[in-house]
């Protein structure tokens, strides 16, 4: 009986310890090294230590959900925020022509300006020969001679053609041109009823020039200086000193200055206007006919207001140019004559006035091939020169040492139309070269023209 009571007490003590360990607010109790055995009983086995579970991390409460409206309850619309404006890409062209200073300044700082700068320049025939001169002279010993020639002028040609090797956009560049004019005007001379070999003479002309911009690239000034090597007239070279016909034309021609300014810009194009100024820096031309020496003065300044346009097509393959110029002389040239058989000095017998002239050039071109280093383009153009008024006829008549002597500067009013075509090759370092030819279509001042040009942009 005593053992039964002791066993029941031991079971109750164990249950009480387990309940105390599971109570949340129970204080920890030290683990006994050995349970106390009841007096006179069997000692209890040692209990294992109570291991508490590790504390759990604090839980994160989910965010409260918005209340779901009942289908029967109308929901007020939520105001929409305006979407931000899309970022517009930087335009590389202007959609419409503009004459405002801001639009022009924007164009000059845009990639379009650099693209138009690489557009090949227009082709153009350069200059017009001097007026026709008809003479009748007695060279002595019965050797009377008559003939018709072009009056000699500085560098072989006169008048500046602004559209030649040019475009509407002001640029920084240097350039050089070579023009060979084949058979410029007739030379027909007769002596004592025996005709000299009727022929024409040619003009080889160099032009060197430079263009520089100012006003932040909106304007430019250009200078051109022609140098002419002319096949002079030399009829009857074996005749006596009074029986020859020969001419002398100065090597250096007239210096030209061209002011150009942008007036409007548009989609891949430029319209500009300006003024050309031809200064009489060349010498006087001289023509000897038997006993007479005629001097053709070079004293007049020419003004040439102009308008120009240059534009790429939208495909950036085709391009075109247009130049319209009016050449206005500001005076008349003196004509003088001297008699080699008489001691008297030369005397002015009249003045010759060049007519006011309209010059119009239209050009078109197309890029044919391009790679990383080179661009090849084809060029073509039409070139009109029209005298707006006839020049007066000037007559000189006098009694020479061997008989009557006369000379006539023939007044004329003409319209000529020429064509040109060629090729333009450009390197990526901004050097470019071109070769072309020009052929007259009406009123031939020359039979043909051969052109070589070289330039560099900066």
Image: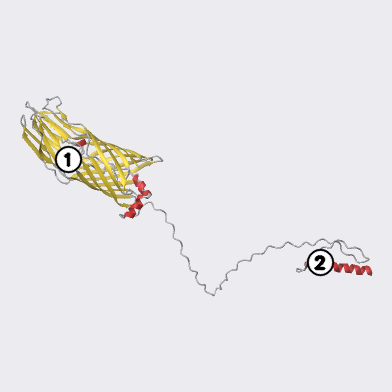
| Residue 234 percent location from the top left of the image | 16, 29
- Which quarter of the rendered picture does the C terminus lie within? top left
In the displayed structure, 43 sits above or below 127; it is: below
The residue nearer to you, when weighing 392 against 38, is: 38
Q: Residues within 10 Å of mark 2 (few under 14, many from 20)?
A: few
| Residue 186 percent location from the top left of the image | 16, 34
In the displayed structure, 355 sits above or below 401; it is: below
In the displayed structure, 7 sits above or below 206; it is: below
Q: Is residue 316 visible?
A: no
Q: How is the image coloured?
A: secondary structure
Task: Using residue 350 as the reference point, say whether residue 305 is left or right of it.
Answer: right
Would you name the residue on which mark 1 appears?
299
Disc number for residue 155: none
SS for callout 2: helix
Which of the two labelled residues, at mark 1 and mark 2, occupies the earlier sequence position?
A: 2
The residue nearer to you, when weighing 293 against 388, is: 293
Extreme-bottom residue of the structure? 72
Q: CA distance from mark 1 to mark 2?
A: 134 Å
Q: Residue at x 20, y 34 (%)?
A: 250
Q: Residues within 10 Å of mark 1 (few under 14, many from 20)?
A: some
Would you name the residue on which mark 2 appears?
18
Task: Using residue 214 as the reference point, say whether residue 5 is left or right of it.
Answer: right
| Residue 408 percent location from the top left of the image | 10, 37
Q: Quadrant of residue 22?
A: bottom right
| Residue 454 percent location from the top left of the image | 31, 37
- Which quarter of the rendered picture does the N terminus lie within? bottom right
């Amino acid at each position: 009986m005593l053992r039964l009571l002791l066993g029941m007490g031991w079971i109750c003590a164990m249950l009480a310890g387990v309940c105390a360990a599971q109570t949340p607010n129970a204080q920890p109790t030290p683990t006994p090294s050995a349970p106390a055995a009841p007096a006179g009983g069997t000692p209890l086995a040692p209990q294992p230590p109570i291991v508490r579970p590790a504390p759990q991390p604090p839980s994160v409460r989910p965010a409260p959900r918005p209340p779901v409206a009942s289908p029967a309850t109308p929901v007020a619309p939520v105001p929409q925020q305006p979407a931000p404006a899309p970022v517009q890409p930087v335009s590389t062209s202007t959609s419409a022509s503009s004459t405002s200073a801001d639009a022009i300044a924007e164009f000059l700082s845009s990639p379009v300006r650099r693209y138009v700068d690489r557009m090949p320049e227009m082709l153009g025939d350069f200059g017009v020969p001097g007026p026709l001169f008809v003479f009748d002279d007695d060279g002595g010993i019965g050797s009377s001679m008559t003939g018709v020639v072009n009056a000699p002028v500085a560098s072989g040609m006169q008048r500046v053609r602004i559209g030649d090797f040019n475009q509407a956009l002001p640029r920084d560049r240097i350039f050089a041109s070579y023009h060979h004019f084949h058979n410029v005007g007739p030379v027909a001379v007769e002596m004592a009823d025996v005709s000299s070999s009727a022929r024409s003479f040619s003009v080889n002309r160099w032009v060197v020039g430079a263009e520089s911009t100012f006003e932040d690239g909106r304007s430019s000034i250009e200078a051109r200086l022609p140098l002419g090597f002319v096949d002079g007239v030399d009829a009857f070279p074996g005749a006596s000193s009074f029986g020859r016909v020969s001419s002398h034309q100065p090597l250096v021609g007239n210096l030209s200055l061209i002011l150009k300014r942008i007036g409007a810009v548009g989609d891949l194009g430029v319209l500009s206007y300006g003024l050309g100024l031809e200064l009489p820096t060349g010498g006087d031309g001289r023509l000897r006919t038997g006993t007479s020496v005629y001097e053709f003065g070079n004293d007049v300044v020419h003004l040439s207001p102009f308008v120009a346009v240059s534009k790429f097509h939208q495909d950036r393959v085709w391009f075109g140019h247009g130049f319209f110029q009016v050449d206005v002389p500001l005076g008349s040239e003196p004509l003088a004559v001297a008699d080699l058989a008489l001691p008297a000095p030369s005397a002015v017998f009249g003045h010759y006035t060049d007519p006011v002239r309209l010059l119009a050039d239209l050009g078109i071109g197309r890029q044919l091939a391009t790679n990383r280093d080179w661009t090849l383009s084809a060029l073509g153009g039409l070139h009109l020169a029209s005298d707006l008024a006839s020049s007066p006829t000037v007559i000189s008549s006098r009694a020479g040492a061997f008989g009557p002597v006369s000379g006539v500067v023939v007044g004329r009013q003409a319209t000529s139309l020429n064509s040109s075509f060629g090729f333009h090759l450009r390197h990526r370092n901004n050097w470019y070269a071109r070769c072309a030819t020009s052929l007259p279509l009406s009123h031939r001042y020359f039979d043909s023209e051969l052109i070589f040009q070289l330039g560099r942009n900066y």
